[in-house]
Amino acid sequence: MDNSRKSIDAASLRMVEKACRDCVETVWDRYEAQQPQCGFGELGVCCRNCLSGPCRVNPFGEPSRAICGATADTIAARNLLRSVAGGAATHVDHAFEAVEILEQAADRRVPYEIKDEAKLKAVAERLGISTEGTDKYQLSKALAARLYSDFAPGKETMDMLARNVPEERLTTWRRLGILPGSPDLEIRRAMHQTTMGVDADPVNLLLATAKMGLVDCYSGLKLGADVQDIVFGTPVPVKTEANLGVLKQNRVNIVVHGHIPFLSEKIVEWARKLEAEAKAAGAEGVQLSGLCCTGNEVLMRQGIASAGNYLSQELAIVTGAVDLMVVDVQCIMPSLAQVAACYHTKLVTTHEIGKIQGAEHVAFRPAHADEDAAAIVRMGIEAYRRRNNGQVEIPPERAEMWGGFSVEAIVSALAKLDTENPLKPLADQIAAGNIRGAVGIVGCNNPRFPQDGVIVPLAKELLKNNVLIVVTGCVAHALGKAGMLCPEGAEAYAGPGLLAVLRAIGEANGLGGPLPPVLHMGSCVDNARIGDLLGALAGYLHVPVSALPAAASAPELNHEKALAIGTWAVDLGLLTHIGMAPNILGSPVCTKVLTEDIEGLTGGKFYVEPDPIKAAEGILRHVDAKRKSLGL
Ligand code: BF8
Ligand code: SF4
């Protein structure tokens, strides 16, 4: 495969070449070895849900029915529901762990604080919990109990959903029959529904998929993000750096990778505390950096530098400078063990459901978080002693990158323009056309696309057209590396209307320059923040979210989680651009419902377009149509 098809990031390309010189196999080699990929799988029309199978039907001819009689529509819809349930399960499990930590922190059984009392009160009050006369520990305990009750059977829907969404959405979802009960029930039911001989109605399966999108957000993203803010603090703007150039030749390089911040926050703490031990080992100290969403978590709250996104994970090790990479769950390539074996790098897994052959497993126990984190940092210091500096080549590329734009931080920046009505300046600038619209660009890298190759040109085109961008996940790293998450990015890329607004906000906040044109709102669970922001704006304007000149986009989607989040975005009423179709195109019913008919039900729909410039045009057409309907 030609290198130009692997990445647009110069640092990545240097490391792709080094990998080749070092005889290290990477994701692109394996991608190539898989070609051509199975056409039946691509179209979503293969099934192995029972032992009569595997079956594959021909969407263009015969056989049009599988052994049990299932059609392409049924098979594709079942497969999609299973994927979205898989994505939702990751977020729900993550959020559930967060609630457990909150409860244990309230009992002082784990070494975590309750850092953000204001957020604790706000979340509790929204759920109707009295905050009078309680201290933060009692209130956290009461909140955890209430959050657990969302997992119990018997409710029409979860409180985190019912009490966090606009009334109009609640009515729409109730009318469609997609209000989820408890998340565990819904995930169980989806597995049941899609097993052999149960649901053979593609529309019924698609409605269950739409329901699963709500499970994903309100028992996963929103729950996780809120609880993590309570325990670790709600992010505030912070300046750091992005790309492989953040690794340091003379320091112990520890990279945190994965998703759940309970481990990585402690690693941050212990990396700082054990500086002296690193110096005793001959290093200048410990350099911590992050990958993927754990990277975003520690960037948002601790200003830890980003080493890169999903397709950079192997390349970080290829630098030869990473002494230890510590991972928990999700988006971690099993190949890391093989890549690490080519260098001195220690790969450490920490989660009971996330072990990798060839890695060392250190079970992370929240009650002993300090001990475990210290042990892992010490393993990194030890590995540094074995580093072969002859193998080290750190790319020079690194870019200034700002993060920490929680909804609270954005509102507080806007409050400098209007204390009484912080959302008014935003609404006014949208009405005046200086901000033409807003787009949340989120999600992954995928080796089908050059790394960042769809994300970056799409963002440039939208900024040029005065669209304000918010980002999370691997997209945040992509645009950070490209220099769009800093004030200079505004001068370089924002259209004149948008730039004027960013300058005014920057000035009012004493930033000494404009606000970055792309606001980094966090990890993938922090997509809930985007929903909250849109909900607040829609509430201020007294319109449904679907009426806003806004859209969502996952240009290089990869993980099942991205499908789950995208489904929620469509539920919310957003045009949701994706750079490739999920594996459903063998089903005419699924294709039509998801890209057309669903708009009549939720106001949102999927829009598939791999070309970034055409995608920007499509998004702008949508934004302009919404402006027109609002009379703007
Ligand atoms: O949860 S953006 S590749 S790292 S799935 Fe994974 Fe996709 Fe990156 Fe984070 Ni989100
Ligand atoms: Fe084939 Fe039906 Fe079994 Fe799937 S459930 S493998 S389509 S017979």
Image (spheres, rainbow, N blue to C red):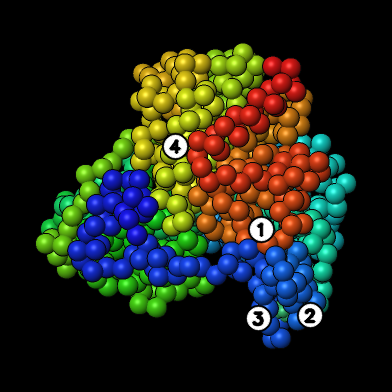
Q: Residue furthest bottom?
A: 51
Q: Is residue 593 left or right of residue 138?
A: right
Using a 10 Å C-alpha cutoff, classify the residue at mark 2 as few (fewer than 14 neighbours), some (14 to 19) or many (20 or more): few
Indicate the amino acid at tag 1.
Leu
Q: Secondary structure at mark 3?
A: loop
Q: Is mark 1 within 8 Å of ligand 2?
A: no
Residue 383: x and y in percent read 22, 67
Q: Is residue 517 left or right of residue 203?
A: left
Task: Say whether disc 3 or disc 2 marks the residue closer to the N-terminus.
Answer: 3
Residue at left offset 46%, top offset 42%: 455
Query: How far separated are the C-alphas under marks 4 and 2?
Result: 46 Å
Q: Which of the two discs, 1 and 4, sits closer to the camera?
A: 1
- Closest to the observer: 574 or 534? 574
Indicate the amino acid at tag 4.
Pro
Circles 3 and 4: CB atoms closer than 8 Å: no
Query: How far separated are the C-alphas under marks 3 and 1?
Result: 19 Å
- Viewer can see residue 126: no
Indicate the amino acid at tag 2.
Cys
Indicate the amino acid at tag 3.
Pro
Q: Residue furthest right?
A: 175
Residue 476: x and y in percent read 45, 42
Query: How far separated are the C-alphas under marks 1 and 4?
Result: 26 Å
Using a 10 Å C-alpha cutoff, classify the residue at mark 1 as few (fewer than 14 neighbours), some (14 to 19) or many (20 or more): many
Q: Secondary structure at mark 4?
A: helix
Circle 2 is placed at which residue position?
68
Task: Say whether disc 3 or disc 1 marks the residue closer to the N-terminus.
Answer: 3
Circle 3 is placed at which residue position?
54
Residue at left offset 65%, top offset 16%: 431
**Image quarter of the C terminus:** top right
Task: Say whether disc 4 or disc 2 marks the residue closer to the N-terminus.
Answer: 2
Residue at left offset 60%, top offset 40%: 552
Query: How far separated are the C-alphas under marks 2 and 1?
Result: 21 Å
